[in-house]
Image (tube, rainbow, N blue to C red):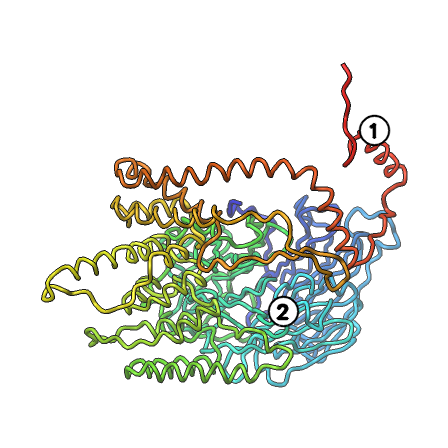
Amino acid sequence: MSTSVNEPFLLSTYTVPKRFTRPGFPVANVYATHQYASTSSADGFVTVAAQGDGVNILDLSTLHPVVSHTLGPSTVFSCLPVSRIDKARACTTYAVLEAAQGVRPEDRGKTARMWRDSLAGETNTTTAQVTVKTEAFSHRITQLAVPDELPTNVLLFGPNGEITVADDDLTVQYSHTFEDASEVQKFFIFDRSQATFVPRRSSLKDGAVIVSLVKIAGSSVLRIVGIDANGIKTLADLPIAGSLAVLDATCSSTGFISILELSGNWHSLQIESPDYSTFVLTAPSSPFGLRNLTFVSTSGAESSSPFAHEAAVLSLGSSHVLLAGVTSPPSSEVVLLLWDLQYSVLLASRTLPIPATISRSKKQGLWLQLSGSSRSQQALLVLSSIPASMLLNGDLGSHAASDDSTQRSAVFVVPMTVPPSSSVANALGRASAGEKWLASAASAGTQASAVDFGLNASQTKLLKQMKTAMEQKRPEAADDVFFAWVSQHEGNRSKSRLNAKLPFGYQLAKQVLEILFRIPKNAATDIPYSPKVVRYLMKQRCVSASMVDGGLFAALRLRNDWESLLLSLKTVMDIPEADVIGLLHTSISAPRQKQADDNAMQVDATTPDTFVPSLQTVLALCVTYTMSAPALRLAIRQHLPDAAELTVVLQALHEMVNAWCDEDVLLLPDRTKKDPHGALVPVIEEKQKGALPPLDKVLVFLQTLLDSSFLTFLTYLPSHAILRDILSHLEPELSFTDDVELLRGPLEPFVRAHTKTVHEAAHGAQKPDLKVDWRRRRKEAHEQAGMAVGVYQIEELLL
């Protein structure tokens, strides 16, 4: 599926009245949210709260307003409004008032207002009557939410982690306050059915899942909270190592999190549940830095830059994230960048000129906002002017808007085409697309943060101890530290999770391998290395070939760790085909080189006394390893150009084919036995064939070998006899396969009957589907009888 960001179009514009008075903290001129509704509107609705004006709801299908609530120039909104539209086209809208007529000074920022009315065009006068209710709460409100799985509730969130659950009339049902939350930087709300990162075994079966980015005692924490009919419960607190100057953040329903810093560093995290009951935080990719965007600041202090609001991010599902920013001078355009952060590639982009009606200067930036719905291929982009009074010497006190130039805002709709999930196919060939926006690690300062990001305190301590031991050339001490850490965490697991694997995230495994494979500056030939930890990680299937600079195979071959090389062919899934065939070539050339050295004079012998695995062992692993046929053909031509070496491989494959062809064909089982449910099942005892790979994989590898080197075999006479012998063994097998295939039809009913018997013994007899009409069942029975073809029926044709 192609990925694209189409041309944005203008939805509406707004102007802040000159009589509007700003509060003592930054507020945007316009707040806009997108809601998907199960009505005739296929594109959903947009709820806009305009400062000094009111709340408007627009239909994206017609681009016209359907509901409007005007409140006057004294109205100040402090956060995004939300709307809920049901199938009867009844619309309920909620907004938080910082100031408005009738709002007491002590209730500023704590007051929510609800409007319930019908969408435009409703003919029922009863439902068309507007219901308005205003309610003050015990805490400030920074965010609202109306989850689909809580259809009669509205959620209200506070700046210090407060969560209040009210009914649709704003009557409080229950609330919860986290005493340790000093500042909540972002809330993400999901329906329980959409939050796939929450395991099915979780006690939360329905309702809503809240993920919040919280700063506690100067450290960032991801807090996962569940809300259902029984109340509010904390599911997990996941600490994030390092100090982050967060500008914006995203979270998808799959648990993929991105955190954008003021310095331009962009981090990725993934919420996982390896044992299906607890949560861990891993880093699926290394952080990277951005450049050529105005918000990027080396100081990391928001108040020091007038362009700190000129960036916003929005999750589009999976690891796809949309970034909106303003390009650095001289162009100064709004740019929309659609990234796949799992692979750190730019998939699509679009530029948009800043409207002439929106003022922007070197000392006065813009306020960018992004919002969207997970069910729509559209996003909302809001561009607002920032008053100069908000930026003057960092003073955010109360100022009248009349001191500034006319403040205008524009709401754009951004159509997009985004795949439902991240894939390698979409990322291939896109590495160079984002070079313009990517900063080097040195200039962006990401190198230091990449080491510890995504790791908890225990893992960070482990890496430091292992690094110290390897720098002192004590690899055994590094092994002891690592396995002591493993034993400690295995002992902390509960009895119900003893069989669960330890959660080795990508970042932890990558950093451990970098420490173990690091070469000291003054090391000539004696490189400190111990393979125990490497093999342990391989057995846990945590190792990727790309984790090691220069490749995993190159690092292992430099240390003559042949046992780990063979193990990697069983556990590592992304080894390049060139490395695999290169290892095969080594297993061929090493014995020949040793034989040549044995025949030479002793003074000329230079072969090191190292173990090299046999050709049969390596070839068996190469045959069973999953590889791409085109890349494999290229690797064979590159590493096996010699006809004699190719013939050695052909002879080994010939022996494998002969071994399989000499096996007796077992048509009937040795015996039968009853399964735990009392049904008879066949017992087939498979013979142990040692390192002999399956015949189908042998033939696939043989075919690829012939495709790449058949002309070489034709010009090399010793290979002709082997090719004829392989053909003589395969032709009878093909004839036998054709003969056995004829038995498929007569035996198929017996196989189905036995399968049905085993299934009914385990699950009981299948009840007839009462939903199918009896006329349909009778028609199907007549059609089957009319065919007159059954297990023991034979068609007769009379001429």
From the viewer's side, name the closer residue of 396 and 130: 130
Residues under labels 2 and 1: Cα distance? 74 Å
Q: For the residue labelled by badge 2, is the local secondary structure a helix, a strand or a loop?
A: loop
In which quadrant is the C terminus drawn? top right
Q: Given this view, does label 2 or label 1 mark the residue nearer the observer?
A: 1
Q: Measured along the vertical axis of the image, is residue 496 above or below residue 391? A: below
From the viewer's side, name the closer residue of 438 and 51: 438
Q: Where is residue 297 in the image (x, y as percent from the top left)?
A: 39, 68
From the viewer's side, name the closer residue of 487 and 756: 756
Residue 450 left/right relative to 491: left
Identified by mark 2, the residue type is: Ser
Q: In terms of sequence position, does the residue under pointer 2 or pointer 1 come before the other?
A: 2
Identified by mark 1, the residue type is: Gly
Instruction: Quickly name the residue at label 2.
Output: 78
Residue 776 left/right relative to 528: right
Instruction: Quickly name the residue at label 1.
Output: 786
Count of numbered tags: 2
The residue sitting at 36% across, 40% down in the picture is 706
Residue 576 left/right relative to 643: right
Quarter of the rendering containing residue 792? top right
